[in-house]
Amino acid sequence: MQEFDLLVVGGGPGGYVAAIRAAQRGLSVGLVEKEKAGGVCLNWGCIPTKAMLRSAEVYETVLHSEDFGVRAENVALDFGAVARRKDGVVKNLTDGVAGLLKANGVTVIDGHARFTGPTSVDVYPTGESPLGEGGPRYAADPAGGQPVERVTGRDVILATGSTPVRLPIPGGDLPGVITSDGAFGLDEVPGRIAVIGGSAVGAEWASMFAAFGSEVTVVEMAPSLVPIEDAEVGKALGRSMSKSGVRVLTESTVSAIEQTDGALRVRVDGSKEQQLDVDVVLMGVGRKPNTAALDLEATGVATDERGFVQVDEKMRTNVEHLHAIGDLTGKALLAHVASHQGVVAADTIAGHESHIDYGVVPAATFTHPEIASVGLTEAAAKEAGHDVVTSRFPFAALGRSKTTGDEEGFMKIVAGSKHGEILGVHVIGPSASDLITEGTLAISLEATLDELADTIHAHPTLGEIGMEGAMSALGLPLHTAPPRRR
């Protein structure tokens, strides 16, 4: 029996951060993890997809290199090399996290945890991946037999994350119908692929495979892609994808998938019924809590109707000394939210003050062009009772965008009309994921349009778009046409 001040179950971006912070606060910490440190984000999500998206970006750039006065011949994609580079990036980062855990004195216990009480677990060997050899093991069941370890903690943090959702579509279990996990197992670029779901996960894979040369169709039930984003951003992404050759079917659903000779036939219901013959179908429609074979009922923890663990603002559950963080809580299924929740939980357990503001959480989607946002959309701001002013400043008006040749997209700012307080920032375009930090800081510090407009930004940079957007919202644009006089 091993005993710790804190036991963390799950070593993803929430769990390993919580473990490190708790160790820094002087607690003895044990961490139970099924596979490599870093969880889904480092092994099967954020990092590997972004590594592959970078390969797609480089490939597209080289294909169009003559636009920059550079001639390249015999350009070809080596998908195997793309995968090997991705694996190298993942290994570098997961090894780094393992090193950080060791350096901070965290005891890592390999295996699958099953609860025997609110603060105690038996650890079993982890079984095989549901997708077979080489697949992800974060959703694997225990191998069975006797536990190899029994562990307790004075406090426990649940951090087991989430798994992809599979829609109950007839034919959804056919070979060739995969989730984002299964996409990493592809050994070649699909000739034809249908992506069900146009939110972040589906849109990123669609963008990637389109760049690699696949014939891509995206089926989304909402009126526009990335439906949680501002409506203008979703429509702009749809136009951009269509221009790049992706077939975008919004306000549509998949009713069935059938196996035909050499293809999967996807039946789509929308403004008109149609069918698609493809080689691969990728379901990118969301995630569900990863609680299988945890024996959570032994803890008495409360969950909602979807199975997400209920927590308060300090990540405490209804059971004393039992906390939960990350995707498992259903608050915001983002790696950076999980990490911040991990800090809050660890600090709370160690007797330190810490908090999280879910109203100021940035989000990024790494399509081409990129999307990022923070705060309220225009529609949400009006629904909340705000009288708003908005601006929409294009990247094409920036000198830096002209020099790089990446002019697509815009920044939209939503602000209060009376005081100019910034309520939301929405970006589609180059480096959107980096540019959103200014918007996040502006909302966090309750900045106004005047303050953003008066802040000197370096030139020529993409970052100038925040200053220019604020000026436009004030009716004082310098590098776009002035508003029409009535």
Image (cartoon, helix red, strand yellow):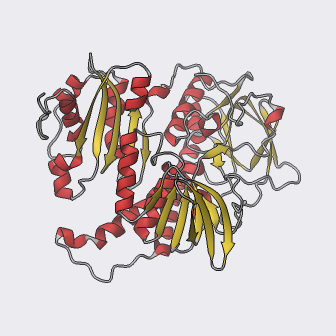
Tell me where residue 294 appears, x and y as whole percent. 78, 42
Q: Is residue 296 left or right of residue 404?
A: right
Q: Is any atom of residue 126 visible in this view?
A: yes
| Image quadrant occupied by the N terminus | top right
Q: Residue at the bottom extreme?
A: 74
User: Going 59% across and 19% down the picture, which residue do you hit?
Assistant: 351
Where residue 98 appears, x then y in whole percent? 57, 50
Residue farthest to the front, as pictured: 272
Residue 405 in the image: above or below residue 191: above
Residue situated in front as seen by the camera: 83 or 391: 391
Q: Quadrant of residue 438?
A: top left
Residue for point 48% across, 25% down:
357
Q: Viewer-proximal residue, 32 or 175?
A: 175
Say if 449 sits above or below 435 in the image.
above
Most extreme residue toward the top, as rendered? 418
192 lies above or below 342: below
